[in-house]
Image (cartoon, coloured by chain):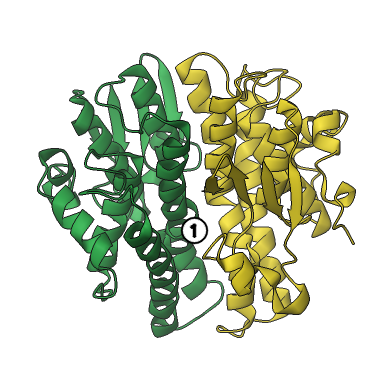
Chain colours: A yellow, B green
């Protein structure tokens, strides 16, 4: 297995956690999203992922894209430990939490979107920061309310064992901290993040612990 | 089962197709996203979905959110006909196509995002239209290249049977047509859309055929 990744990419971070939880050895192929005008846009990487996005996973001749599709694939190929609860309604809950981050927060604050705001639309750096804060805090407020109210919330987002929800939540919190977002209003989210980071699979997947970290 | 939906919502459209393909009877509960300042923001609907988003599905005492989580749930509870291929790598392919739409195109062109652009950021209507076109055409160009090149592409996005990929593709194309996006450069996408719309499950889920259509 070979993972094309960038240390700071939230989507790559999700897949790294899954690989660690499953105990799967994987070659680490860094793609630098900033250096050299963006290595992800060079022909060498376009042959792997035509859109120049990370992560991508090579496994057994298959070239897989989209972090959540990759994690579901790893979970189907290597069922232990499971990354989704057993009951369908609980699986839907874990997937909904994950998708709330992957669809409703993360895509709005992607590098390419922030570049469009400041480049094409010519918005100020302050307005760009405000945009980032707006979508993260709207999303986190909703997640916090849901996690605080749901009896399935445990040490982690769905009980005490890591699920797809934690794989999305932890990188999003890491990213929010990097952008200096105040997290005082989200105690449940912070508690889950802090607990997850005591687990080797999460801590070792963190951007600062990657070979391409700066 | 009860589906909270809005006729024009792409995410609701996805779930309606799944319910039709599975042949599941479902009460249709319209939530008007524009009328009365947005019925989705009223306390009655906030009790169902605190974020005021559609769709939401009530089933057997469970309240489910996020269209892709709902579709995976329906597929697990009612396996026939399957909405994902059998082999894990093919399932990952179908999910990746779906997520490419659900994460990389749709969230950027949501009503709430377009409102932020014209309201908070004060961009012109023309710049808003350009934003919409930019993300749809970037996403469609990528999907077109992938679908045209992949031997798994059939009458539909993954072979000849409907999958999660078609459930996302068809509403996105419907939406692009509504916004008068030229689709001449995406013949494979258009061919899949045209074929899907010959199937009752897709056609009957289309916005214009809903009880709340205007």
**Residue depicted at x 26% and y 72%:** B183
Tally of numbered discs: 1
Image quarter of residue B60: top left
**Residue depicted at x 62% and y 20%:** A82
Query: In the figure, is residue A119 to the left or right of B19?
Result: right
Residue labelled with disc 1: B104
**Residue depicted at x 77% and y 56%:** A8
Question: Which residue occupies the foreground of this view, A83 or B205?
Answer: A83
Q: Is A136 drawn above or below residue A33 in the view shown?
A: above
* Coordinates of residue A30 in the picture (x, y in percent): 76, 58
- Report the quarter where the C terminus of chain A lies: bottom right
Q: Is A184 drawn above or below residue B177 in the view shown?
A: above
Question: Which residue occupies the foreground of this view, A169 or B97?
Answer: B97
Subunit of mark 1? B
* Coordinates of residue A161 in the picture (x, y in percent): 71, 19
Question: Which residue occupies the foreground of this view, B56 or A195?
Answer: A195
Query: In the figure, is residue B59 to the left or right of B201?
Result: right
Q: Please, what secondary structure does the residue beneath circle 1 have?
A: helix
* Coordinates of residue B192 in the picture (x, y in percent): 22, 55
**Residue depicted at x 64% and y 29%:** A147
Query: In the figure, is residue B79 to the left or right of A86?
Result: left
């Amino acid at each position: 297995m070979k993972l094309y990744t960038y240390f700071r990419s939230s989507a790559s971070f999700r897949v790294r956690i899954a690989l660690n939880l499953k105990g799967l050895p994987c070659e680490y192929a860094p793609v630098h999203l900033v250096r050299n005008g963006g290595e992800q846009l060079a022909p060498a990487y376009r042959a792997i992922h035509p859109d120049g996005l990370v992560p991508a996973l090579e496994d057994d001749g298959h070239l897989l894209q989209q972090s959540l599709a990759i994690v579901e694939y790893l979970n189907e190929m290597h069922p232990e430990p499971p990354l989704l609860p057993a009951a369908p309604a609980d699986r839907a809950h874990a997937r909904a939490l994950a998708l709330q981050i992957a669809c409703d927060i993360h895509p709005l604050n992607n590098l390419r979107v922030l570049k469009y705001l400041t480049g094409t639309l010519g918005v100020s750096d302050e307005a760009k920061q405000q945009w980032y804060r707006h979508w993260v805090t709207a999303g986190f407020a909703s997640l916090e309310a849901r996690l605080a109210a749901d009896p399935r919330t445990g040490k982690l987002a769905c009980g005490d064992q890591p699920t797809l929800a934690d794989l999305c939540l932890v990188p999003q919190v890491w990213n929010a901290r990097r952008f200096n977002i105040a997290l005082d209003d989200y105690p449940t989210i912070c508690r889950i993040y802090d607990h997850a980071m005591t687990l080797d699979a999460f801590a070792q997947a963190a951007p600062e612990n990657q070979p391409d970290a700066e």
